[in-house]
Image: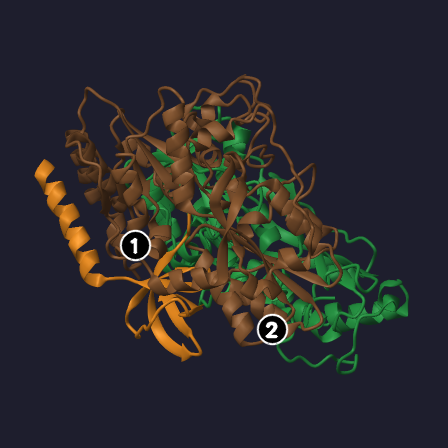
Chain colours: A brown, B orange, C green
Amino acid sequence: MALRYLDEFRDPALAQSLARAIAAAVDPQRTYRFMEFCGGHTHAIARFGLPALLPSNLKLVHGPGCPVCVLPPGRIAQAVAIAEQPRVMLCTYGDVMRVPVRKGESLLAARARGADIRMVGSALEALKLAEANPDREVVFFAIGFETTTPPTAAAILAAEARSVKNFSVLCCHVLTPPAMRHILASGEEAAGVLLDGFIGPAHVSVVIGERPYTEFAHTHRKPVVIAGFEPLDLLQALLMLVRQVNQGRAEVENQYRRAVTFAGNRKAQQMIAEVFTLRPTFEWRGLGILPDSALAICSRYQQWDAERRFPLEPPAIPDHPACQCGAILRGQKEPRDCVLFATACTPEHPLGSCMVSSEGACAAYYHFGRFHEPVAPRKKEYHASA
Amino acid sequence: MCLAVPAEVVELLGEGQARVRIGATTQVVSTALLDEVAVGEYVIVHVGFALTKLDADEAAQTLALMAEWSEEVS
Amino acid sequence: MPAPDSLGAATPASAAHGAGKGAQVTLAHGSGGRATAQLIADCFHRHWHNEWLAQNEDATRLPALTPGHVPVVATDLFTVTPLFFPGGDIGTLAVNGTVNDLAVRGATPRYLTVGVLLEEGFPIATLETIAKRMAAAAAAAGVAIVAGDTKVVERGKGDGLYLAVTGVGEAPVEPVWGAAAIRPGDRLLLSGPLGEHGIAILAARQAVPLETEIVSDCAPLVSLIAAMRATGAPIHAMRDLTRGGLAAAANELARAARVGMVIDEGAIPVHPAVAGACELLGIEPWHLTNEGKLLAFCPPESVEPLLAAMRAHPLGRQAAVIGTVVADPNAFVQMRTPFGGVRLLDWLHAEPLPRIC
């Protein structure tokens, strides 16, 4: 049974010819550097082995669009601390469960010590657990960019409608345009590393539409092409970006027209506006403190705000001093440029944000692409050649 | 950054829920983010919610454009 | 104590002979006295019959090996939740899993021993059902359960039931199937579609909100392997895919044999239902657990006869050549994507969790 709207966009023959079209379109005298902002794109590019199809002067730079990667470990420590409060049942998406915080600490480790931490696939599942367990305090750990935010808003609105009192949300939702702004700003400050354009996130754009990217095209003069998740989508989007660069255009184009509209999902946007408010500042792992880049629950819904119910400050937990995640997230360095990559820092023992989640730049490269590098003899996990 | 998959709406369950199908697997999702949806339409599913409807015409046009651009090179 | 949903709905009704309806395992059952003997008689000896178990001693004397054969032994622990799942149960899994470990080393499995660790409060009727299932699985696999032991731990100190199974078989002195025999140029043969057990368990555990008809592929591979051996075509190594899936098996053998592999993604059979579930969960099928699939390594000239034998067998209808062994001191398992790209088929550190990103 074919998977509709997936299989057609994975047709290998079309992929090969789109790749040839890209190769024919690039100007051999220059390099093209495009950032795929979205971690899901990073994962898809690595998983399908797309770099092998691209000409050598087309570089893909991995951006910070991985909510688990940019979540400061202090926030996870905050979630653990809440989970260890009496009667609390903490609900979380699977992605965050294994992220190590300090030596030995993670949500999974806390669960092993007896905290009631449950993996859920949806915010509404957490709400249902609250209704089914009236004697417990159910807290939902809400992470994610704009794609994942409307579901959290819907859960809070449902909690209000159903008068569920024992439910609250630890809101760590972050926003895409401020992060893109930061990357462009730091690129412009730092010498030499400039991006020629962005592959715009697929499903964030389903929610926010095309409009928010206009500033990057008009003010920063960077082309943005919103792309779907499938290999053909990415290849077509890259071709569109190459053409924009060649023609000296800087526009927002939408390759993912079957799901993204100019205005986006208005209803979802309204729900977000209803329930959340902008935090003046928020710490992003690897990027530092960014202004107006994250959401908090607004005062009207404060009774469902876990930060008010459990006033436990997130501790400041710095990354390893040799960690290059900041530079990697900004597109200035690659995983292989970091001395910790695949030595001290592996998916099993991630030291920085880019390795913690499978769609972080370093994790994606480790899982899918590290065989491109000669393996250093000091790596313990490989046998020395006989 | 967001794993979201196209799925077909096979049943409307009332109370803002629908059953969707991807391949032979089904799942109950919330339709709270949509204005309306009908059986037979396709939606994008993320964390247990339908995020938007898939536009079949746009999908066909995208594929046609891809094919056209591919032919230009051969 | 296991939550009711892991047993209740799926436990078939079964009269607890001589134990009273609703009877539960108590600490007395593990003490070695009359209660233990009664439990063993009611649950195990009622369903497990053979001349060796009938010796009824603390250790069982086995017949001499077939001439020209060496003993092969394997041991496995089973802790699956839920105990009953679509396509199987912990008992069947325990028998098939151990039998398969022996069979992929080229052994004919003959005898099993079963260690049963029970949690106080476990329903005796359920234990008997599992014993019956094990008897059926053993008969299907051509093995006899010849020894066992039972212990009981306090309520809260166990997960209902754990099984520890040791299997003994015999294999010809030559050839030796194993990592040491694998050579660059060998081909990888996969017996069938990936991921069924993994998805069936995830859905049965309700760890993820998906509804599926997928059932576990739990099965003994003995007769499939016998059919492959009967072709006379040389086989270098075999592995039954279990936890960690194809990725784990390939990487383990690559490291042990100090070779690399290149796998062709397009050639890997995946059940369409599994593919859809994987898309929803953000998991790749080659990391999922299987319980009735094998990966074989053979020289190129063996491919045709082996594939023919596999495809003629019910468990091997979708058997396929999926890759090649290459020289590589770093023992990477690479995968060629249908787009001509290459990526690693990496070995995950732990079970894949569903992701949202």
Q: Nearer the viewer, residue A174 or C15?
A: A174
Q: In the image, residue C316 lies at what x, y percent?
A: 40, 54
Pointer 2 chain? A
State the SS at label 2.
loop
B32 w.r.t. A46: above or below: below
> From the viewer's perspective, is A154 left or right of A243?
right
Determine which quarter of the picture holds residue A379.
top right
**Residue behind mark 2:** A164
Classify mark 2: residues with Cα within 10 Å, few (<14), some (14-19) or many (20+). some
Taking the image as shown, residue A374 lies to the left or right of residue A222, namely right
Which amino acid type is marked by label 1?
Leu
Quarter of the figure that contains the N terminus of chain A: bottom left
| Sequence-wise first label, 2 or 1 | 1
Give the image location of residue A66, x and y in percent: 46, 43
For discs 2 and 1, the disc positioned in front in the rendered view: 2
Residue in view at x 50 percent, y 32 percent: C254
Q: Which chain does tag 1 point to?
A: A
Q: Is residue C89 left or right of residue C257?
A: right
Front position in the image: C111 or A17 = A17
Q: Amino acid at mark 2?
A: Val
| Residue drawn at 30 percent across, 74 percent down | B38
Q: SS class of the residue under badge 1?
A: loop
**Image quadrant assignment for residue A86:** bottom right
Q: Judge whether C223 appears above or below C189 on screen.
A: below
Q: Quadrant of residue A42?
A: top left
Residues tagged by mark 2 and mark 1 found on one chain of the structure: yes
Q: Which residue is mark 1?
A: A6
* Label 2 – label 1 distance at C-alpha: 38 Å
